[in-house]
Structures are given as structure tokens and as C-alpha cells.
Image (cartoon, rainbow, N blue to C red):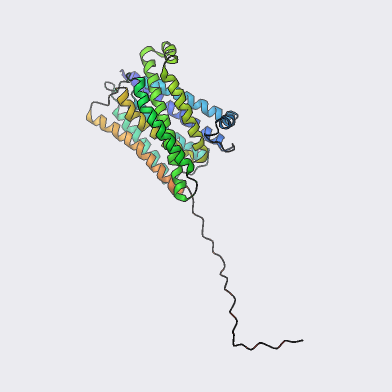
Amino acid sequence: MTHTHLVAGVFISVVSAVLYNVGFVLEKHALGDMESVHARRLWHLLGSVLSSPVWVIGFCSMLLGLGLQVVALSLVPISVVQPIFVSGIVVLLVLSHVALKERLGRREWAAVALVALALLAISLSLDAQSDQAGSTGAFDTLVAAGVPTIAVACWFFMTADRLRDGRRAHGARAPLFGLASGLMYGVASLATKAVSAIVEKRGIWEAIPHVLASPYLYALVATSALGLLLFQTALQRCPASVVVPVSNVVSSVYVVAVGTVIFGEHLPAADWKLAMRVVGFGAVFASVLLLANAASATSEPEMPLVEEPIVLPPPAPDPEAVPSPSVD
């Protein structure tokens, strides 16, 4: 791989992350003005979101981000693209603070600092010789990895949906929703990587008929649609500054761990560059833990104590007291 391809892949990954998270914020803003939607009521959900111009613009921004992610994955490995893609939580947190009026505490800003550290570590780990985009992998292998993951994602979603009462349950709801949608999007990312491998082999224009005839495209559409249904439900019920980072990082952890093996990609050969790649990946994951803990701490603010007036009971009557004579 040439240095130019490596730089282009990193740049496209950054633009993809920005567009993707701007789309999330626009969708969250639109969902706040809608009546309640749920993944179980499919047609009602679709009718509600498609009737909102702001939501449609956000969705198009997300699609463009995903399209650029396919291009980036055809240039550089998953272990480079995914952590950069997750770093878009910085855009999300800032926009959530400015546009959605979601308060950011010390833990959220610490998460932003960790993401900055992750980007620095990943940039230092880049290696033009070893960072080759993988092009191997079989559809049956993807199915074997994806089907149980989808089942686990649905279980997380149903568990989160049942959590309604109690402070601890309310605080765990957003991370569980994020886990569910993140795993579903992780499977979609594996299909995205498979599509990008076709693009890498044949070029963008020549790959179009091969992509249309490939089962990877339809696996991508199906898993992305399921992830969308789960995510829109979660996004309306929980803070975007928690659900989106958890979802993004879980999907990235999954696709890096599984996709690197399936597609036969290589990590940096130099020990110190490999260490930087691991540090970058770990810093992104740690930022999610901070955000999840922040959600638990601020999900249900304590009510201030109100001093009530002390009311004394009336004195008991004295049985030995002589009743006063009545006056006619």
C-alpha cells in the first residue's frame, strides 16, 4: 500500500465519522418532536420518521457516511477505520451539548479526551507495509458469526425494553439499548467490509454489478434495517450522548475482533506500532465505559429535600379533670 492510499483512507474515515454522527444528532432532534415510536410497530415508526424532513436529512447524512466507510475499508484495514469511525463521538457529544441541550459532565469530557488520545495513538500506529485491506472471507463464515450475534442483540433489546422502574434499571437502560444496536450494526459492518472487498478487487464502477449480485449486499441491507429499528427506539427513549457512543464502540469492537480474522487482515509488524494500535483501541473502549457510568449517575436526579412544617398531635384529654358546667 502506498502512503497516498493510507492517508486517503484515514481522511475518508474521518469524513465518514463526522457525517454519520451529524446524522445521528439530526435524527435525535427530530425524534424529540414525534410521538412515541417502537420497533414493534414497524409501519407507524416508518410513517413517523419519513414524514419528518429533519429526520430524512439526518438519515441521508448517515447513508453518505456509511458509503464513505465502504470506500475507506477498501483502502485501509478494519483496525484503522473502525476506531476512527468511533471517534466521531466527539462530534456527537459537542452537538448534543449545543443542539440537544444535553448536559456534559466531567466523565463525558474525559471520554472526549480519551478519544483524542486514541486518535493520536492510531495515527502513530499506521504502517504502509502491513496495513493492507483484507479481501478474503466467505459468506457462510459471515453467517456463522452473524446469526448468534443477532440473537444476542435482540435479547439485549428486549431486556432494556422491560426496564422501566427504579433508578438502577433506568440507568442501565441506555447502555443495554446501545449494546443491542451496536451488535446489530457490528454484523452490518462485517457485510460492509465484504462489499468493500469487492470494490477493492474490481474498482468502484466495475464492482457495481458484482455487488448487486452478491449476498453480502442483501445481508448488509437486512442487518442495517434491523439495527435501524432497534436504534430509533433507543434514540427516542435515552440520551444520544450515551446510546450512540455505546452503539458505535460495541459495533467497532465486534467488527475488529471478528472481521480481522474473517478477512485475513494483519496488524502492524513493529512492536511499538502494535502497542499504539492496542492503546488507541483500548482508549476508545474506555471512553464508552465512562459514558455508561455517567448515564447511571445522572439518569435520575435526586429530588431536593423540602422541609415540611411539624404538626404536633392534639393533647390527650385528662380523665381526672372536672368538666366545666355548661352555661345555658
Residue 161 visible in rendering:
yes
Q: Which of 141 and 305 is in front in this view?
A: 141
User: Image quarter for residue 71?
Assistant: top left
162 over 136 or under it: above or below: below
Placement of the N terminus among the 4 image quadrants? top left
User: Image quarter for residue 252?
Assistant: top left
How many marks the image carries: the answer is 0
The spot of residue 250 in percent (x, y) is 38, 34
Q: Nearer the viewer, residue 60 or 137?
A: 137
The spot of residue 49 in percent (x, y) is 57, 31
Residue 89 visible in rendering:
no
User: Image quarter for residue 217?
Assistant: top left
The spot of residue 44 in percent (x, y) is 58, 32
Q: Which of 302 and 163 is in front in this view?
A: 163
| Residue at the (29%, 29%) spot, across then down | 125
| Residue at the (42%, 10%) spot, across then down | 206
Determine whether, in the image, residue 128 is placed left or right of residue 242.
left
The spot of residue 212 in percent (x, y) is 45, 15
Outermost residue, left direction? 271
116 over 328 or under it: above or below: above
Outermost residue, right direction? 328
Placement of the C terminus among the 4 image quadrants? bottom right
Determine whether, in the image, residue 228 is placed left or right of residue 53.
left
